[in-house]
Image (spheres, helix red, strand yellow):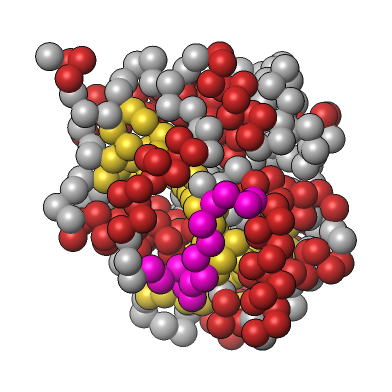
Amino acid sequence: MAENKALIPVHLLSGFLGSGKTTLLTNLLEYYKGQGLKPAVIMNELGDINLDGQLVDDEVPMSEMLSGCICCTIRGDLSMEIKSLVDEHQPDLIVIESTGAANPIEILDGVTEAAMYCRIELQSVITVVDGPELLQRRRSGKGRTYKLMQEQIRCATRLLLNKVDRLEPEELVEAQQLLRELNEHAPVMATIRCFVDDWEWLASSKQSAASSALPTVTTAGQQRESAASCGCDPNRDHECAEASFDKAEHEHEHKYDHAHDQRNHHHHTHDHVMVLTHYLNGAIDSEAFEALLKRLPDNIYRAKGIVTFSDTASRFLFQYAYKETDFMRITPQGDVNDVAVFIGEHFSKESLLAELEQLERNV
C-alpha cells in the first residue's frame, strides 16, 4: 500500500557562489552510484541556462530551474519539480543544488509543500563554505553578501569548510571558530575540493535534521519551529529577521506571471546580485578570453560557461571564482550553445558586454 512506501530522502546543497557545491554534488552522485542507488537532481541557476548540469551524468534524472532564485521568484515551482521527478523516475533520493544567492530557509517552503504530493523527507541541509572567502568577507565587512553567507551557515545541518588548503593553520582555526559561533550544532568537516572519503554521516542525516528542527512535513507548527531555528520571524513568510536583502529586493515580482518573466526578462531576484548571460556567436581566441577573465573586477566573483576556441579543436566548460579559472574539455550532451555567464555585485554590464563583443569581432 502507498502508506507503507519508504520516504524519499531529500538533501539540500547550499553555499555561496563559487564555494564548491557542484563539485560536492558530483562527488555525492558518485557515492550513491557506488551504493547502487538511483539519485535525482534539481539544479537552480540565476541565469537562463544550466551550465553545471553538463557535469552531471546523463543517466541521472535532472530538473532545471532557471532564470530566478529558488528561494524567491520560482519557489512555488519547486514542489512541482520534486513531484514530477518522483512520478516519472521514482528515485531513491533527491539532491537539490540551490543557487549561491539563495537563503536555505526560504527553500524549505517548496520542499515541505511537495510532501503534500509525494512521500519525501528532507534529511539534510549541507552548506559548503569557501574558507578563504568567508574570512575575507568577515574582515572587509562587506554587508549583504556576508550576511547571506551567515544565514546559509546558520541553516545547515552539516558544514563543509572547503578550500582549507588555501588557509594558514591559524586561519583554519579562525574559520572553524567562526562557523561554530554561527552554528553550534552542525558538524564541521574540513575539505579540499569537497573531497569526502567517508560518507557514513549521510546515514545519520535524518537524526541530524531532526535535532536541527528541520521540517519533514508541512504542518504550520513545524514550519514555525524551523524558522525559529534559523533566526527567522515565523510570522513573515520565512523572510529572515536579519535580512540579507532589503524588503524591496526580496519581494516577488507579482505584476508578471512566471512564464512571462522567463520569456521576457533576464530578471534577478536580488538587486545586489547581478547576472549577465551572453551567447557567443562563434569561436573566440583562447588567450584573449583568459586575459579578459584575469582583468575582471573584484565585484565579479563568479563566471562560467561553454566556449569554443578558434585555436583548438574542442569545446570547453570554464569556471571562474574569485580570480581563479578552470577549463575542462567537454563533449556537450545535446544541443548546447556557447555562452558565458557572469555573476557579481553592481558591475557594469555594458562594459563587460562590449569586451565580449570585441572578442567575437577579433576572430
> Is residue 66 at all visible to an observer of this figure?
no
- Whether residue 70 sits left or right of residue 355 in the image: it is left
Residue 19: image location, x then y, percent: 58, 63
> Is residue 289 at all visible to an observer of this figure?
yes
Judge by depth and name the residue closer to the eye, 104 or 314.
Answer: 104
Which range is magenta? 183-196
Look at the picture and state if 59 lies above or below 330: above
Residue 61: image location, x then y, percent: 27, 42
The prevailing secondary structure element of the residues shown in magenta is loop
Look at the picture and state if 11 lies above or below 241: below
Task: Please give the name of the residue rendered at 59% of the width and 85% of the height, measured from the top-left corner.
Answer: 287
Quadrant including the C terminus: bottom right
Task: Please give the name of the residue rendered at 74% of the width and 78% of the height, measured from the top-left corner.
Answer: 295
Q: Is residue 272 magenta?
A: no
Q: Quadrant of residue 207?
A: top left
- Whether residue 43 sits left or right of residue 142 in the image: it is left
Task: Please give the name of the residue rendered at 72% of the width and 17% of the height, measured from the top-left corner.
Answer: 235
Q: Across the whole image, how many numbered discs are drawn on residues?
A: 0
Residue 80: image location, x then y, percent: 41, 23
Task: Please give the name of the residue rendered at 73% of the width and 20% of the height, measured from the top-left corner.
Answer: 236
Quadrant including the N terminus: top left
Residue 229: image location, x then y, percent: 63, 34
Judge by depth and name the residue closer to the eye, 6 or 26.
Answer: 6
Q: Is residue 190 magenta?
A: yes
